[in-house]
Amino acid sequence: MHNFEKLKIWQKAMDIAVSVYEISLLLPEDEKFNLIHQIKKCAVSISSNIAEGSGRNSNKEFVQFLGIANGSTFELITQLILAKRLKLIGEEMVQPIINQLVEVSNMNFSFQKTLKNNNE
């Protein structure tokens, strides 16, 4: 079992969630139950799955939840790109978050590899 609050990947995912909640306030009200809801859901899912996986019984189970977190990472990147393409939010707001998401994804893949190697 891992202490998720000490994991750098979880901390970065939480920072991303805060940023997403902040920029979601800038999106049009008519997107509240569509894109805004989906973006927030994905942002929360990343850190939540890292935390849930850390409490599982084995590294194999943890890797499974890290995979789910990574899926949410790529889903969120797609939604942010969509918001940008729809001109709902500017490049200058979206790109730093996408850069952070790419960093978290790279960390995730490395962490999964480490956990898998420790399982052998």
Image (tube, grey):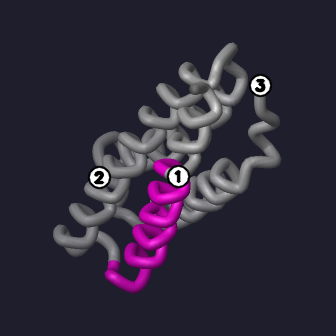
Residue at x-position 22% and y-position 74%: 87
Give residue 29's mark: none
Residue at x-position 65% and y-position 18%: 58
Callout 3–callout 1 Cβ contact below 8 Å: no
Task: Using a 10 Å C-alpha cutoff, classify the residue at mark 1 as few (fewer than 14 neighbours), some (14 to 19) or many (20 or more).
Answer: few
Answer with mark 2 or mark 1, whichever residue precedes in sequence. Answer: 2
Tell whether position 104 is magenta: yes
Q: Give how far apart the Cα atoms at labels 3 and 1 are.
A: 18 Å
Q: Quick one: SS at disc 1? A: helix
State which mark lies toward you, 3 or 2: 3
Answer with mark 3 or mark 2, whichever residue precedes in sequence. Answer: 3
Give the magenta part as a residue range.
Answer: 90-109
Give residue 1's mark: 3
Task: Give how far across and how far down residue 97 sits, in percent.
Answer: 47, 69
Is residue 88 positioned above or below 49 on the image?
below
Q: Which residue is mark 2?
A: 30
State which mark lies toward you, 2 or 1: 1
Give residue 110's mark: 1
Q: Main secondary structure of the magenta part?
A: helix
Answer with mark 3 or mark 1, whichever residue precedes in sequence. Answer: 3
Task: Give how far across and how far down residue 3 sits, in percent.
Answer: 81, 36
Along the viewing direction, whichever of 28 and 101 lies nearer the viewer: 101
